[in-house]
Image (cartoon, coloured by chain):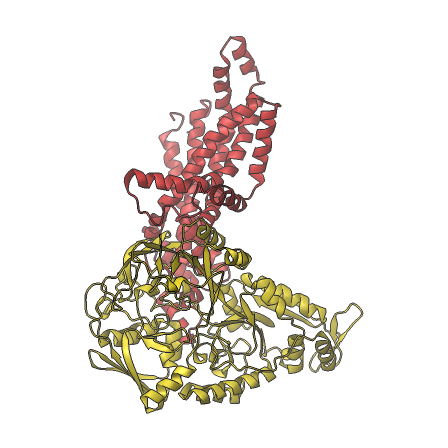
Chain colours: A yellow, B red
């Protein structure tokens, strides 16, 4: 039973796809070198180093090396042991039983036990970690600790995605003796953390750098290799690249598009692309149609807009090739849920024009389209839509304006900062169309369901922006979340994608990837993991 | 300094109180009038409605705005700037941690631009309408017109990447934690480029002001009289310079605010760990307490700089008396 479930779950679990680029592969063939200082650039001062109380990318990028999850994920996304050395899936996925490693110690020397896991989930993650709370909070019935090395998760009904939600990104484990009885958001340990991870904090110079020292008692014998790892805070992405070129840092989480070709062509560096990011993985830039707006309820109009959209320029001009044109509503970085071979509307301006004419939006003398017999719209009304986006996504807006404009649709760009965008779109629903980087996460249950399920229509941000309602799709998502068998679950997600491609509440533009870059003197990085430097080393 | 009476000083310091109150009210209203919601920045993008309501209540963001304003004003007048949403720590300590780096950057830039600006202005006036003057005037015009963020990028490419002489980021070398004199030398090495870039704009302005003022002063009757009395040219210039410095001091004092805004950009480009970086990240996260604390600090700095300008004025010009 256990072996079977492991196999089916393993086959379903996600691939944090990592593609190596650059003149030569990682120096994996070289023997790792001990000692030295590894310098990593991060974009922001995280403020604190507690990854269990936030999903902020800044905190997770800086802090995950201090902690561990119960499980990790291998390069194909299959669960691998971390703090738990083995596990068992029972009652068709309604009970998960974990056996913890023996002899694991916190950085302060205290022993790690099952009580730490129970406390972290119940008192921290299920209250403060947005993704874990939103996904596990409802289905979870309870957590038991039969003994110090055993932990059991009981669900109200079978819950499929648990094993992909237990790494240091989704569920880092904190020390109960450090956090119990204190406010987890103001606990001094947030800036002086006590974890189990490969590194422990040496110094936190606010706004400047975070210095980590090798944890000599790390439970993975021999790791990590460097004596010291410095997270240097460099907010400007261009400065990060220049610092890499100047030899001041060894590793970058991302390379801005204009610098990509330069860095990739430079023999001093290695690069790798990944869909993983500490703040949100496997993201697709997606156009949402506000289905509360009467004219956008017409599926032929939405199909016309999709046909009017040429997605290749988005990939080439905005992402500089860092990604791929979306082939399905679910990311191809989740191969077991991604439905290959779907017939998404292809770029065909003639078809777009034909559909717009058929709906009643006719071209007038100046080329603009006006209503001529559109139900519920006064004749002569111009076809004009607004397009809301983050300022950082302005180029998406410009391309949409040009491309839809060529089909006679007037588009007004409305750039809104993230903190303004969310209430405008999800609470006030004040938009016609928008573009959002929807991150699918490690499992569709976490980042895809919230886009389509009717229970996810506002006011929470980055949920169902289209206000899409389809009882069949709702039922399929509910069934998929209970289905542990990989093949069956894949079929359910395929059905969902076939329906939404027909109904087009969204149009999926491009999947985005990040490019990690590091000095060729270094090796052993895991670009698709929060424990990215657990095996890393540098030659000096 | 005798020109300033203690009554004048006391009156002006007393005026600080209503100024602070007005600043608190204005900045609080402005920051809340601006669109945006800190809850998204705090909670991330994947929470449910209950989670965001929970976060809002924890930070007191669910209370009516007047109640939040009253609580904030009471705390500030009691010396408490509140707790940062993002950092979970007192704003005062966040500011105190980063203030030294910003003060070092700004004071170096101010010193550099004032000293070099006066010297170059003197040189340009002395060589008026000759090639050296033309060169200095052109350079000053260019320096004044160049945005600091662009100049910063050029400086990095030309002087750091191009020559390897300077580091491109940070305040110290990440790989070698030095102490004592070596640490001071390391900081100076990292300070050079950002301070030069921040100083460029002010340097250009000061050079032009000193040159113009000096040329004007050298044509006045009292200078002609001094020369007729046989005073050496150096002393004549010193007399004239004292009068020229009046508008220069006014400009320098009035531009503390500009220097602060320049520091924000320069700190971002050079990853200088000062208040500028904190201001930028707090703005993006809508970290209201941190933002209000820094706005208050910068506003106070501008007010105090203007007061200091008044005092220096009295010292430079004996005819001025403050009662």
Residue A213: quarter of image: bottom left
| Vertical position of residue B168 compared to residue B249: above or below | below
Who's the residue at 73% across and 82% down the image?
A: A358
Residue lying furthest right: A365
Which residue occupies the foreground of this view, A170 or A534? A534
x, y percentage for residue A197?
29, 66
* Left or right placement of residue A150 versus residue B174 in this view: left
- The answer to whether one can see residue A94 in this image is no
Which residue occupies the foreground of this view, B126 or A375? B126
The total of numbered circles placed on residues is 0
x, y percentage for residue A268?
46, 54
Which residue occupies the foreground of this view, B248 or A120? A120
Who's the residue at 58% across and 37% down the image?
A: B142
* Left or right placement of residue A23 versus residue A118 in this view: right
Residue A478: quarter of image: bottom left
Who's the residue at 72% across and 73% down the image?
A: A381
- The answer to whether one can see residue B190 in this image is yes
- Placement of the N terminus of chain B among the 4 image quadrants: top left
x, y percentage for residue B138?
60, 32
């Amino acid at each position: 039973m256990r072996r079977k479930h492991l196999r089916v779950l393993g086959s379903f679990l996600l691939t944090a796809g990592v593609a190596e680029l650059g003149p030569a592969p990682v120096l994996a063939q070289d023997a790792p070198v001990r000692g030295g200082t590894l310098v990593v650039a991060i974009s922001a001062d995280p403020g604190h180093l507690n990854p269990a109380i936030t999903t902020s990318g800044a905190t997770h990028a800086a802090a995950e090396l201090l902690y561990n999850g119960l499980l990790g994920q291998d390069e194909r996304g299959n669960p691998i042991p971390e703090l738990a050395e083995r596990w068992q899936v029972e009652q068709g996925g309604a009970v998960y039983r974990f056996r913890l490693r023996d002899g694991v110690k916190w950085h302060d020397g205290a022993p790690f036990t099952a009580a730490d896991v129970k406390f972290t989930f119940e008192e921290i993650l299920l209250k403060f970690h947005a993704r874990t709370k939103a996904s596990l909070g409802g289905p979870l019935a309870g957590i038991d600790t039969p003994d110090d090395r055993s932990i059991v998760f009981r669900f109200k009904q079978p819950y499929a995605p648990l094993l992909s939600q237990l790494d240091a990104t989704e569920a880092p484990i904190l020390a109960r003796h450090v956090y119990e009885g204190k406010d987890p958001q103001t606990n001094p340990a947030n800036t002086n953390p006590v974890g189990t991870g490969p590194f422990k904090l040496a110094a936190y110079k606010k706004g400047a750098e975070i210095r980590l020292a090798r944890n000599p008692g790390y439970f993975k014998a021999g790791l990590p290799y460097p004596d010291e790892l410095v997270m240097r805070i460099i907010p400007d992405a261009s400065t990060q690249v220049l610092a890499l070129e100047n030899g001041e840092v060894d590793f970058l989480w991302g390379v801005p598009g204009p610098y990509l070709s330069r860095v990739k062509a430079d023999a001093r560096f290695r690069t790798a692309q990944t869909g993983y990011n500490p703040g949100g993985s496997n993201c697709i830039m997606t156009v949402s149609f506000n289905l509360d707006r009467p004219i956008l309820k017409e599926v032929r109009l939405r199909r016309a807009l999709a046909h009017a959209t040429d997605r290749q320029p988005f990939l080439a001009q905005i992402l500089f090739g860092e990604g791929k044109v979306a082939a399905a509503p679910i990311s191809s970085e989740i191969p077991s849920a991604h439905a290959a071979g779907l017939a998404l509307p292809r770029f065909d301006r003639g078809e777009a024009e034909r559909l717009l004419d058929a709906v009643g939006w006719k071209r007038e003398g100046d080329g603009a389209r006006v209503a001529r017999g559109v139900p519920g719209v006064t004749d002569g009304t111009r076809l004009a839509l607004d397009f809301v986006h983050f300022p950082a996504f302005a180029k998406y807006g410009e391309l949409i304006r040009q491309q839809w404009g060529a089909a006679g649709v007037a588009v007004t760009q409305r750039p809104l900062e993230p903190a303004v965008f969310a209430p405008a779109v999800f609470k006030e629903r004040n938009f016609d169309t928008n573009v959002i980087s929807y991150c699918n996460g490690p499992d569709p249950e976490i980042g895809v369901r919230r886009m389509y399920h009717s229970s996810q229509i506002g006011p929470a941000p980055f949920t169902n922006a289209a206000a899409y309602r389809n009882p069949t799709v709702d039922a399929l998502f509910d069934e998929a979340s209970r289905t542990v068998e990989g093949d069956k679950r894949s079929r359910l997600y395929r059905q969902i994608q076939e329906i939404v491609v027909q109904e087009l509440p969204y149009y999926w533009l491009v999947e985005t990837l990040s490019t990690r870059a590091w000095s060729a003197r270094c090796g052993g990085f895991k670009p698709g993991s929060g424990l990215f430097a657990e095996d890393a080393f540098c030659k000096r | 300094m005798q020109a300033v009476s203690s009554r004048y000083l006391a009156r002006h310091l007393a005026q600080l109180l209503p100024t602070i109150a007005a600043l608190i009210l204005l900045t609080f209203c402005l920051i809340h009038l601006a669109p945006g919601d800190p809850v998204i920045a705090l909670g991330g993008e994947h929470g449910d409605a209950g989670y965001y309501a929970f976060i809002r209540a924890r930070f007191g963001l669910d209370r009516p705005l007047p109640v939040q304003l009253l609580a904030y004003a009471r705390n500030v007048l009691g010396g408490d700037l509140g707790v940062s949403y993002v950092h979970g720590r007192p704003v005062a300590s966040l500011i105190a941690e980063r203030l030294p780096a910003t003060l070092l950057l700004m004071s170096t830039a101010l010193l550099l631009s004032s000293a070099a600006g006066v010297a170059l202005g003197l040189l340009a006036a002395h060589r008026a309408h000759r090639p050296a003057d033309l060169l200095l005037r052109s350079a000053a015009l260019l320096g004044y017109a160049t945005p600091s963020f662009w100049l910063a990028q050029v400086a990095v490419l030309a002087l750091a990447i191009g020559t390897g002489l300077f580091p491109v980021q940070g305040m110290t070398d990440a790989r070698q934690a030095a102490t004592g004199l070596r640490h001071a030398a390391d900081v100076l090495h990292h300070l050079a480029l950002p301070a030069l870039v921040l100083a460029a704009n002010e340097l250009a302005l000061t050079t032009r002001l000193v040159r113009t003022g000096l040329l004007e002063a050298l044509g006045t009757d009292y200078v002609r009289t001094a020369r007729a009395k046989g005073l050496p040219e150096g002393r004549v210039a010193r007399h004239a310079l004292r009068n020229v410095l009046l508008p220069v001091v006014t400009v320098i004092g009035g531009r503390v605010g500009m220097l602060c805004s320049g520091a924000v950009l320069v700190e971002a480009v050079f990853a200088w760990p000062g208040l500028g970086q904190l201001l930028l990240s707090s703005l993006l996260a809508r970290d209201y307490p941190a933002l209000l604390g820094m706005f208050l600090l910068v506003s106070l700095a501008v007010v105090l700089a203007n007061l200091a300008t008044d005092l220096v004025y009295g010292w430079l010009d004996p005819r001025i008396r403050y009662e």
